[in-house]
Amino acid sequence: MAADSRQSTERIELPRLILLQVITLLLMGVAMFLPAGTIGWMRGWLFLVIYSMMTVLAIAYLLRVNPEVISARSRWHQGTKRWDLFLTPPILVAFPAILVVAGLDDGRFHWFALPWWVCVVGYVLLLCGFGGLAWASAVNKFFEPTVRIQADRGQTVIQTGPYAFVRHPGYASGLPMFAGMALALGSLWALTPGALAWLLLLVRARWEDAMLQAELPGYRDYAQRVRYKVIPGVW
């Protein structure tokens, strides 16, 4: 029965998922190459190819181990905290902002030229961010795009995988992901919107953690066992 349910989820979600990813890549291309002023920007094309490969691998992995989370993350849900409705949009805007600034910088004006080895470091960071996000999504079926108590889905405290080390590994993955995107595209200036987005993620992590401790049974005990919210040994 479980296998049949998983196959049904994959069959229903896959066409919509493919369309969503194609649209996302097209919009990413516009956000990068329009500011760059040229379609000959090599670092831009390389980024799109590698980013696409990482996305396909992550989705294939999640379809196998936790397809429910893909459905959950592809929709906004009722019950989202009001403060998150104001906090999430600027975080989402930071993603294309990194691409736009990188296109202006490395693609067009070359404000601060970076060597290729810095781009390689960027891809390593990006891979770490992707990996951390995929790991968190794989073990947590309640990994939704907005903050709420998921009473309709029987939400429980997740304590396995990366959640054994930090309480919010998804946010922890944001730092290497945002920084990796900017550096992979060869732009120090693109670190600026990424840094702003991660600061907002830290605010969101703090508020979400307080909500979970107040409203999710068992989370307060979990927080006493796993001390750090986002960065092991720091916070």
Image: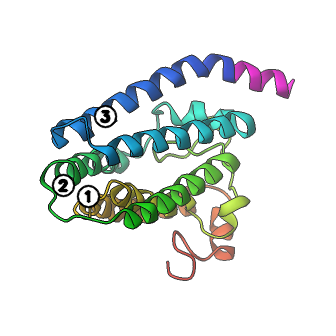
Image disc number at residue 101: none
Vertical placement of 34 versus 177: above or below? above
Q: Quadrant of residue 56?
A: top right
Image disc number at residue 190: 1
- The residue at the point 30 percent across, 58 percent down is 186
Q: Amino acid at mark 3?
A: Gly
Q: Quadrant of residue 60?
A: top right
Which residue, given by chain and number where applicable, does mark 3 sit on? 29
Closer to us: 129 or 10: 129
User: What distance separates the C-alpha of mark 1 from that of mark 2?
Assistant: 8 Å
Q: Which range is magenta?
A: 1-9
- The residue at the point 56 percent across, 17 percent down is 15
Residue 177 appears at what percent x and percent y? 44, 57
Q: Nearer the viewer, mark 1 or mark 2?
A: 2
Local SS, label 3: helix
Q: Amino acid at mark 1?
A: Ala
Which residue, given by chain and number where applicable, does mark 2 sit on? 105
Closer to us: 156 or 110: 110
User: What distance separates the C-alpha of mark 1 from that of mark 3?
Assistant: 16 Å
> Quick one: label 1, few (<14), some, or many (20+) residues within 10 Å?
many
Q: Amino acid at mark 2?
A: Asp
Earlier residue among tags 1 and 2: 2
Earlier residue among tags 1 and 3: 3
Indicate yes or no whether the magenta region holds residue 25.
no
Vertical placement of 213 versus 88: above or below? below
